[in-house]
Image (spheres, rainbow, N blue to C red):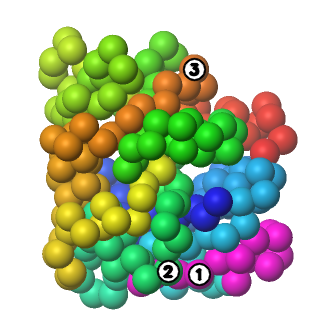
Amino acid sequence: MQAVILAGGLGTRLGDLTRATPKVMLNFNRKPFLYYITRLLQKQDIKDIVICIGHLGEQVKAYFGSGDKLGVHIRYSEEGEKLLGTGGALKQAGNMLDSGFLVLNGDTYLPIDYHEVEKEYLRTGRKALMVVYNNEIDTGVENNIALDSRKMVVRYDREGISSALNYVEAGAVILRREVLDYIAEGVAISLEDGIYRPLIERQELAAYVTEQRFYDIGTPEQQSAFEELVKKVAL
């Protein structure tokens, strides 16, 4: 299985912390956050990795290089001066991608077995499978997903204001490459608007429900939670 890591965001919510450092390169126990995601993939023998970089992306390339030191093979898709959003960045990387691939948010750590997710993706036969969590342990991210009885995503709402939203996107999704056709070349757009919405309309976005919480680093509180995990568990 191939993995794509979205690591081009500005991280504006973190203010001075990300003014000179990409969010994915913030240190936890003396290693950048992105190291832990890469290490998780390597442990599961997922070694073909594409990293979509943008803001200060040269720092990512300088640290990880070809990935050889971590036992993986890394290629980079660079947005350049014009940031394209998560959807646009994925579209730009299209010629590097397999017919099906795992997409991970570069600011989210989700320690689950991605081969089990792949099995469910293949079983459903849908064009996409999103990992969702029920927020039983508060992640600091509002619920934004509604599912039907078949575990199909029927609504995605980042505002999280409806009681029908019982799950939260966990930062991992498997996509068929053909869904990139929903996005025009060079257009700046999010995954949510460019790919998830048309998939939901076509009833092609299935869900994999996990009981494992994820770790986001978008706020100081969330960073503290991940720091505690790193101290307790050898990642």
**Residue 159 in the figure: left or right of residue 81:** left
Residue 96: which disc? 2
In the rendered image, the quadrant that contains the N terminus is bottom right
Q: Label 3 to label 1, Cα distance in Å?
A: 31 Å
Pick the front one: 24 or 152: 152
Q: Is residue 125 visible?
A: yes
Pick the front one: 35 or 105: 105
Q: Residue at x 42, y 32 (%)?
A: 207
Establish if 34 lies above or below 97.
Answer: above
Which segment did they paint magenta?
A: 66-78
In the rendered image, the quadrant that contains the C terminus is top right
Residue 109 coordinates in the image, percent (x, y)? 58, 44
Q: Residue at x 50, y 61 (%)?
A: 100
Mark 3, secondary structure of its residue: loop
Residue 225 coordinates in the image, percent (x, y)? 58, 32
Residue 46 placement: quadrant: bottom right
**Residue 70 among magenta residues:** yes
Around disc 2, counting alpha carbons within 10 Å, would you say few (fewer than 14), some (14 to 19), or many (20 or more)? few
Q: Which residue is mark 3?
A: 211
Mark 3 vs 1, N-terminal side = 1
Establish if 176 lies above or below 99.
Answer: above
Pick the front one: 85 or 183: 183
> Which numbered mark, 3 or 2, is in the foreground of this view?
2
